[in-house]
Amino acid sequence: MEISEIFKQKKTGLSFEVFPPKKESGIETIYKTLDALTELNPDFISVTYGAGGSQVTNASTIDLCSYIKNKLNIETIAHLSCLYNSKEDVSKFMQELKDVNVKNILALRGDENPDYELKNDFKHASDLAKYIKSVDSDFFVSGACYPEVHQEAENIVEDIKNLKIKVDNGADHLISQLFFDNNAFFDFMEKVRIAGIDVPVEAGIMPVTNKRQIERMVSMCGASIPAKLSKVLQKFGDNDEAMLEAGISYATDQIIELAANGVDGVHIYTMNNPYVAKKITDNIKSIINV
Ligand code: FAD
């Protein structure tokens, strides 16, 4: 089913994110991961894009999207960041995607990286969204959004104004940054809808499976840790098995509450771990279909 159709159904959308492996030794594993994720029947699987188009192995974003779409028959979204891509690069990327029968892009700005030279054709993700639609309006364009405010934004009002530009420029759907406090997401959604942003918004869920990983994530994206999760980390953080079980339960609880409150969809950051995705999906199978 085309992604634009997914959110017209009554059920809660379910999608996964994977990233291309960083080492050659991970190539075989990523295809096995994708095979395993397919069994969980997601609406789509998105594939991240390295800063500056950096591709460390021979499994690129486009290769993985092609495998998902053409071998596994699942919809897929290719992430694409724009600071280090020219208009020509983006057109080429779009053509390569079209060649493998994929017409869905998550349009991102990306973050500055001193290892690469800025191309200066695009400043914001909204510029990229506009360009993609101008080249081929049949492309389905997604965008990122930030329930706890993007780290560079002055405040939530500015951030949502900018988000509205992204949607007005062509973003058909949004995927949120990870968050652990559902109330932050609910507050954000209220403001998003008041601002007249009416596209489907998927909630980004990152299962916390070890303490180090969450400390790194939180320092990178600034997600707040509610007291309930903080207690879980304190009590189980040094026991890998207990933390894994607790992290799966925490993500499950988050999803149940989001679904009960009518979220458009949940996007699970799988970290290429099909075991965790399966455990969570098994817990919410009926819930997301109501
Ligand atoms: P933008 O939407 O451009 O926003 C960035 C900042 O600029 C915000 O503070 C915003 O308020 C401001 N802004 C936006 N538009 C305007 C405007 N018109 N005028 C003034 N200010 C403006 N990174 C990768 O490198 N590869 C990936 O695959 C990847 N996948 C991601 C997936 C998701 C779901 C999310 C949430 C993030 C992902 N990222 C990825 C990270 C992302 O690139 C960074 O968060 C980056 O800092 C911002 O990207 P953006 O597309 O949200 O930028």
Image: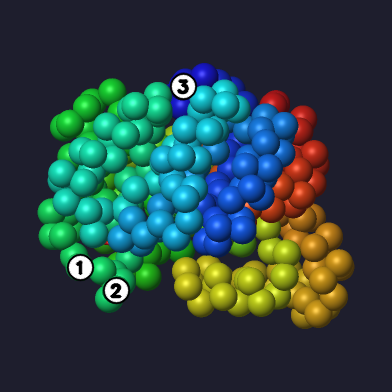
Instruction: Check disc 1 and report its element: helix, strand or loop.
Output: loop
Give how far across and how far down residue 111 sits, in percent.
Answer: 33, 66
Give the total number of marks visible in the rendering. Answer: 3
Asked whether, in this view, residue 195 is left or right of residue 258, the answer is: left
Where residue 16 sits, quadrant-wise, is top right
Q: Nearer the viewer, residue 162 or 37?
A: 37
- Report which residue position mark 2 lands on: 115
Specify whether tag 3 is near ligand 1 (CB below 8 Å).
no
Ranked by sequence position, the earlier of labels 3 and 1 is: 3
Asked whether, in this view, residue 260 is left or right of residue 137, the answer is: right
Specify whether tag 2 is near ligand 1 (CB below 8 Å).
no
Give how far across and how far down residue 68 sits, in percent.
Answer: 54, 33
* Residue 239 can be seen in this image: yes
Mark 2 to mark 1: distance in Å?
Answer: 7 Å
Disc 2 versus disc 3: nearer the observer: 2
Q: Residue at x 56, y 75 (%)?
A: 216
- Kind of residue indicated by mark 2: Asp
Instruction: Check disc 2 and report its element: helix, strand or loop.
Output: loop
Q: In the rendered structure, are the residues bearing label 3 and label 1 in contact, judged by CB atoms less than 8 Å apart?
A: no
- Report which residue position mark 3 lands on: 2
Mark 2 to mark 3: distance in Å?
Answer: 37 Å
- Report which residue position mark 1 lands on: 117
Q: Quadrant of the C terminus?
A: top right
Q: Residue at x 64, y 71 (%)?
A: 213
- Kind of residue indicated by mark 1: Glu
Give how far across and how far down residue 240 sits, in percent.
Answer: 82, 71
Asked whether, in this view, residue 77 is left or right of residue 266, the answer is: left
Mark 3 to mark 1: distance in Å?
Answer: 35 Å
Q: Nearer the viewer, residue 128 or 12?
A: 128
Q: Quadrant of ligand 1?
A: bottom left
- Kind of residue indicated by mark 3: Glu
Query: Which residue occupies the extreme left position in the image?
Result: 121
